[in-house]
């Protein structure tokens, strides 16, 4: 997997500041896409890459906080760095609670912004990787037959093949064979790995067992 | 009368008109010549001649009778008459009776046809003759004594008239129609210092002020042509060279044929009245200046000039006590040498600091009659003497509370005290000067209070805008930081991209200017600078204030529109104050739309030009879509401390209106047809 070039989105209604920020980020080799309004940002086609959003709190029309809410609502996990011309604590608390990465007051030290951007992009990259992995796992899990899913539940619950067979009312040999299929399909090298994957998929072994008992 | 009139002085003619019209006997007017003259009483003169004529007729009858009785030759009869008349002239009845009888006896003795004493009254003719002699003598005596009494009366009257004419407080004279001056009174001679001979012809030009020549000549020509009385106010020169105002009134005297035979003139000294009038007019002018809000320096200067006009030879000086009450500062002294006024400017007051410093210190008038010797002038003596100032009379100007405001002083170049009229003027003018100073102080205090109030409300408004303003300043600062950092990054590269660096640095410069502009605008609004009057472009004022308030309006979701007329005429005024008016109106508009649905929030700023009778006017209107104002509000809208805002001071519209009115404009509000209100103000365009 190659490291994708990150993109920084800027939403600020002040054209001169937008341009200055674009120049600053370009100077450190970051790709920048700048928008004057929240609406323009929402309607624009955004490249699928690790990114972050540098957002002015005070915007005409939809404000920065409104945009943050909107993005959360559509489940876009874009890290947001808020900028403001006037530090106002309740507003920054709201923004941070809603998941903002950083809240910077203009004028800020450029290093603070760059650090925040790097941090945000890293976070986005990790999040994107996680998300991709999860999709993959889901995909693998979806390829299991219902019986294999039951076996998987038994395995991650820490049951022996014999116990699983008893639970499912089948033979131990069959369980063993199905377990092999599960391990293969889930691309798990060990039980521990399978347990981790299951955990990430949100499969509750206890529930499974509870249901079986 | 020929040529221009020459009326040195004229006799009071009304009396003549009432009592006596000369009927050809003009020679009875005594020509007193240069010694002063009296017009004899015409009535006495008239009786004298009538009596004389009767006496003559009586003597003629007696002479004829005597000649018949004694058959005398006419020669003897006349001799006899002469004797009787001579005796009668004594005026004594007894003597004249004795002498007349004796005369008869002598005549009878010497002239009798029969020589020898014949004192016998046997002949009835002799008795008649004696009686006739006696009666004649007595009649003549009686006539003579009456005549004598009449002469005495005339002489007394003449003396009295002469006294009156010389005594009446006026210069009088009589002029012949030819223009020759017939007589003038003693006062005239004393006043002008001229002789009657010197006054003849165009001599009048010697004592009439040159500026009045034309007026007098014109008036007298017109009067001559019409034969009408006339009067004129004229300055006449006194023997010491000083001109004084006189009211000259001249009336014609006509004979029975209606021809003008004399012009009688009387000149009354109206100098004091003129002076009082001028003083009053000057005071009125000064009060008008004060009421018109003229600068104190101009008022005091005019005041000094008025006093100097009123009192020849004095130099007026007004010094003002400074705020600490310790030093005297120059107020006005239009005629004192600048080098002198500069030298005394700022002198500390004290018990012995010239006239003014001492007067201000004591709060009492200080009259120094000779600077050269007065101890109080020790420190300033040389300075004053070097400027030929020898006397100085200073009076403190007191406020209504009795506080010393300054001094009002008169200088003289001769060592002397003030004349009465100078003292009067000082007493009248000093309070006026004090009023001018006090009024200026009050106006200044009021102006300062107004300016401070306006400033405080500006500060309050800016406080409301603080967040937006911080944003406005931080925005360019953030851009500058970003651009500068970018530059550093680019410069750190192995092959720096100078084009990028240049672009970023250009932006840095622009953003710095932008930040400085915002700061400058705020500093202007916060400044305590005194109000100025300079040409202002209201269009620019609109732009400046929208750039300041715009971010706040946008933050509140208010759409801002402007429709500015092109070629707005400039207005004269204080830019900051006009900015404040607009700022207030914009903030009010924003406040009014607090409850308005966001999509309807809008502010429209229009400007229009209106051509009225007195020139072009600029009208600026701020329209909002807010709650508007009800009828009650409309009436109270511009009152101080009236507000509909929860946190409002209620000063915005009050101050805005007073600012606009100080700029000779009006501020008013109208309700919009749909919703919201519009506030308008108009200002006269620069002429």
Image (tube, rainbow, N blue to C red):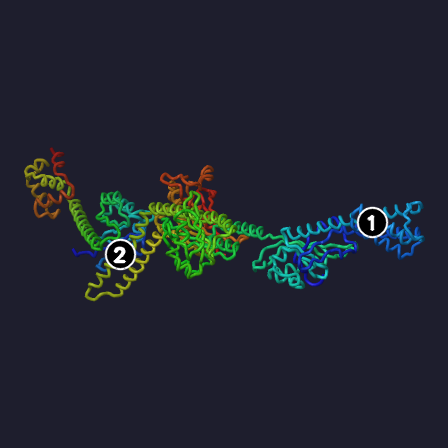
Q: Residue furthest top?
A: A213
Q: Position of residue B286 (x, y in %)?
A: 50, 51
Whole-percent x, y for residue B168 in the image: 64, 50
For residue A151, the mark is none
Please indicate whether residue B415 sits to the left or right of residue B194 in the image.
left
Q: Which residue is mark 2?
A: A21
Instruction: Give A72 or A159, whichever is nearer the viewer.
Output: A72
Q: Please, which chain is the residue tagged with disc 2 on? A: A
The image quadrant where one finds the N terminus of chain A is bottom left
Q: Quadrant of the C terminus of chain A?
A: top left
- SS at circle 1: helix
Marks 2 and 1, Cα distance to the nearest angstrom? Answer: 155 Å
Label 2: state its secondary structure: helix
**Which chain letter goes with mark 1?**
B
| Residue placed under numbered mark 1 in the picture | B99
User: Closest to the observer: B273 or B16?
Assistant: B16
Task: State whether residue B107 is above or below residue B648.
Answer: below
Task: Answer yes or no: is residue B649 visible.
Answer: yes
Identify the residue at horizontal 60%, vertical 62% (top origin).
B210
**At 36% from the left edge and 40% from the top edge, which residue is drawn?**
B647
Specify the farthest residue to the front: B116
For mark 2, does the 10 Å Cα neighbourhood hold few (<14), some (14 to 19), or many (20 or more) residues? Answer: many
């Amino acid at each position: 997997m190659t490291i994708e070039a990150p993109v920084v989105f800027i939403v600020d209604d002040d054209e001169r500041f937008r341009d200055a920020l674009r120049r600053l980020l370009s100077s450190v080799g970051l790709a920048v896409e700048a928008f004057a309004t929240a609406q323009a940002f929402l309607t624009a086609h955004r490249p699928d890459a690790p990114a972050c959003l540098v957002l002015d709190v005070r915007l005409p029309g939809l404000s920065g906080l409104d945009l943050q809410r909107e993005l959360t609502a559509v489940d876009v996990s874009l890290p947001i760095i808020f900028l403001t011309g006037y530090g106002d604590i309740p507003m920054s608390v709201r923004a941070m609670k809603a998941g903002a990465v950083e809240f910077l007051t203009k004028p800020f030290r450029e290093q603070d912004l760059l650090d925040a951007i790097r941090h945000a992009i890293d976070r986005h990259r990790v999040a994107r990787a996680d998300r991709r992995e999860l999709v993959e796992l889901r995909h693998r899990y979806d390829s299991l037959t219902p019986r294999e899913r039951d076996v998987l539940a038994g395995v991650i619950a820490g049951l022996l093949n014999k116990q699983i067979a008893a639970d499912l009312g089948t033979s131990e040999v069959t369980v063993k064979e199905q377990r092999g299929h599960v391990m293969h399909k889930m691309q798990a090298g060990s039980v521990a790995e399978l347990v981790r994957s299951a955990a990430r998929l949100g499969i509750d072994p206890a529930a499974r067992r509870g249901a079986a008992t | 009368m020929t040529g221009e009139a020459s009326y040195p002085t004229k006799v009071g003619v009304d009396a003549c008109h009432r009592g006596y019209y000369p009927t050809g006997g003009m020679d009875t007017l005594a020509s007193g010549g240069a010694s002063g003259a009296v017009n004899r009483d015409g009535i006495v003169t008239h009786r004298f001649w009538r009596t004389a004529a009767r006496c003559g007729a009586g003597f003629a009858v007696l002479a004829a009778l005597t000649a018949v009785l004694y058959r005398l030759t006419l020669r003897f009869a006349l001799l006899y008459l002469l004797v009787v008349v001579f005796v009668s002239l004594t005026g004594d009845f007894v003597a004249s009776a004795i002498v007349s009888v004796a005369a008869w006896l002598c005549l009878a003795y010497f002239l009798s046809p029969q020589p020898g004493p014949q004192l016998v009254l046997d002949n009835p003719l002799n008795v008649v003759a004696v009686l006739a002699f006696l009666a004649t003598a007595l009649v003549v005596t009686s006539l003579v004594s009456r005549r004598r009494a009449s002469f005495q009366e005339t002489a007394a009257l003449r003396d009295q008239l002469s006294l009156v004419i010389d005594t009446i407080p006026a210069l009088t004279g009589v002029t012949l129609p030819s223009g020759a001056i017939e007589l003038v009174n003693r006062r005239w001679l004393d006043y002008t210092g001229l002789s009657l001979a010197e006054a003849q012809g165009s001599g009048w030009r010697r004592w009439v002020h040159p500026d009045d020549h034309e007026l007098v000549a014109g008036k007298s020509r017109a009067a001559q042509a019409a034969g009408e009385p006339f009067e004129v106010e004229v300055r006449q020169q006194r023997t010491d060279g000083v001109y004084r105002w006189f009211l000259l009134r001249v009336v014609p005297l006509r004979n029975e044929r209606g021809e003008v035979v004399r012009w009688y003139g009387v000149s009354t000294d109206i100098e004091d009245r003129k002076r009082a009038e001028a003083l009053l007019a000057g005071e009125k002018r000064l009060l008008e200046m004060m009421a018109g809000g003229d600068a104190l320096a101009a008022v005091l200067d005019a005041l000094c000039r008025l006093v100097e006009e009123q009192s020849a030879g004095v130099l007026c000086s007004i010094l003002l006590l400074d705020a600490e009450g310790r030093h005297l500062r120059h107020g006005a002294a239009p005629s004192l040498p600048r080098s002198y006024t500069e030298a005394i400017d700022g002198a500390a007051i004290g018990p012995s600091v010239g006239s003014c410093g001492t007067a201000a210190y004591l709060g009492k008038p200080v009259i120094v009659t000779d600077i050269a010797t007065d101890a109080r002038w020790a420190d300033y003596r040389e300075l004053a003497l070097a400027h030929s100032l020898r006397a100085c009379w200073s009076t403190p100007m007191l406020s209504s509370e009795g506080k010393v405001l300054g001094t009002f002083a008169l200088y003289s170049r001769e060592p002397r005290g003030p004349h009465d009229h100078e003292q009067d003027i000082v007493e009248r003018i000093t309070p006026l000067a004090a009023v001018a100073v006090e009024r200026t102080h009050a106006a200044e205090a009021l102006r300062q209070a107004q300016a401070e109030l306006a400033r405080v409300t500006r500060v309050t408004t800016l406080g409301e805008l603080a967040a937006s303003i911080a944003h406005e300043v931080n925005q360019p600062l953030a851009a500058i930081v970003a651009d500068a950092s970018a530059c550093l990054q680019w410069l750190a590269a192995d092959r720096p991209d100078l084009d990028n660096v240049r672009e970023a640095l250009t932006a840095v410069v622009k953003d710095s200017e932008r930040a400085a502009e915002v700061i400058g605008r705020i500093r202007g609004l916060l400044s305590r600078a005194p109000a100025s009057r300079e040409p202002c472009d209201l269009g620019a004022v609109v732009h400046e204030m929208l750039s300041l308030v715009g971010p706040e309006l946008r933050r509140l979701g208010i759409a801002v529109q402007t429709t500015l007329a092109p070629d707005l005429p400039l207005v004269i005024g204080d830019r900051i104050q006009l900015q404040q008016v607009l700022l207030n109106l914009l903030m009010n508009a924003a406040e009014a739309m607090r409850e308005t649905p966001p999509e309807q929030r809008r502010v429209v700023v229009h400007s229009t030009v209106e051509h009225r009778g007195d020139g072009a006017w600029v009208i600026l209107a701020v329209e909002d879509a807010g709650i508007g104002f009800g009828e009650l509000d409309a009436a109270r809208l511009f009152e101080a401390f009236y507000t509909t805002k929860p946190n409002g001071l209620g000063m915005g519209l009050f101050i805005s209106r007073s600012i606009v009115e100080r700029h000779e404009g009006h501020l008013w509000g109208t309700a919009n047809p749909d919703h919201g209100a519009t506030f308008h103000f108009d200002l006269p365009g620069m002429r």
